[in-house]
Image: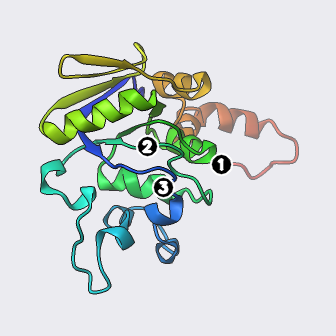
């Protein structure tokens, strides 16, 4: 699937150096599949020891259904666990806009089709404040124009060209790439002299 742009409402998450352990606590890494991880995103900062909701943007009803996460600097630092972006995606986030990202976290986002784009600190501050004032505002992350548009504003964004190309060309989904090449893979495998049982 080609991802040229992502549109939706924003969810501002202030703070810098938000690590993967805060995004998804380690005890939830034992899952067999990623399907149910969305409910555990930021669990330990969203709920107290009695599972009562805390004051956290992911619990704020004003942002319910938002699909574009707005973050600060060095988001996704810490361990390289792929569960972190998976939990964010399962929560309903389809793009992340921030000042900067840990490199492995950003790569893991690209691998599951989430653009993790960066912008200047001032632009991120303005975007967060705008969304706090108007949570119903729609915005668009445009990978062709390299901009985020919201209200009457546009801000410039950056994304490594390798990641941008993978998203807009649809090559980010390695499973889909393999499945689409199934016939060629079978043809090549059938010609291998040591592979007599390929089917």
> In the visual, does 183 lie left or right of 40?
right
Whichever of labels 3 and 1 marks the residue nearer the N terminus, that label is 3
Q: Position of residue 136 (x, y in %)?
A: 12, 37
From this view, report whether residue 59 is shown above or below residue 67: below
Labels 3 and 2 touching (C-beta < 8 A): yes
Mark 2 secondary-structure assignment: loop
Circle 2 crowding by C-alpha within 10 Å: few under 14, some 14–19, many from 20: many
Question: Of the residues tagged 3 and 1, which is closer to the observer?
Answer: 3
Q: Quadrant of residue 157?
A: top left
Q: Position of residue 17 (x, y in %)?
A: 52, 53
User: Which residue is painted at 50% across and 22% down in the image?
Assistant: 169
Residue identifier under label 2: 72
From this view, report whether residue 105 is shown above or below residue 159: below
Q: Quadrant of residue 148?
A: top left
> In the visual, does 190 lie left or right of 122?
right
Residue identifier under label 3: 18
Q: How much space separates mark 3 and mark 2, taking CA atoms?
A: 8 Å
Residue identifier under label 1: 199
Instruction: Work out whether residue 46 can be spotted.
Output: yes
Q: Quadrant of the N terminus?
A: top left
Q: Position of residue 159 (x, y in %)?
A: 52, 26
Mark 1 secondary-structure assignment: loop
Q: How much space separates mark 1 and mark 2, taking CA atoms?
A: 50 Å
Whichever of labels 1 and 2 marks the residue nearer the N terminus, that label is 2
């Amino acid at each position: 699937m080609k991802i040229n742009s992502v549109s939706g409402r924003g969810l501002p998450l202030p703070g810098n150096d938000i690590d993967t352990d805060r995004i998804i606590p380690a005890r939830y890494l034992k899952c067999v599949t990623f399907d149910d991880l969305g409910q555990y995103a930021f669990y330990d900062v969203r709920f107290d020891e009695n599972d009562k909701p805390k004051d956290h943007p992911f619990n704020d009803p004003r942002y319910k259904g938002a699909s574009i996460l707005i973050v600060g600097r060095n988001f996704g630092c810490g361990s390289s666990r792929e569960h972190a972006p998976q939990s964010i995606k399962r929560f309903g986030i389809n793009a992340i806009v921030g000042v900067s990202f840990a490199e492995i976290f950003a790569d893991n986002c690209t691998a599951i089709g989430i653009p993790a784009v960066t912008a200047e600190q001032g632009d991120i501050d303005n975007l967060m404040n705008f969304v706090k004032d108007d949570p119903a505002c729609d915005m668009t992350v445009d990978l062709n124009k390299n901009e985020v548009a919201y209200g009457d504003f546009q801000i410039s964004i950056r994304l490594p060209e390798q990641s941008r190309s993978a998203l807009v060309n649809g090559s980010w989904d390695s499973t889909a790439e393999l499945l689409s090449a199934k016939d060629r893979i079978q043809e090549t495998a059938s010609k291998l002299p040591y592979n007599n049982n390929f089917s």
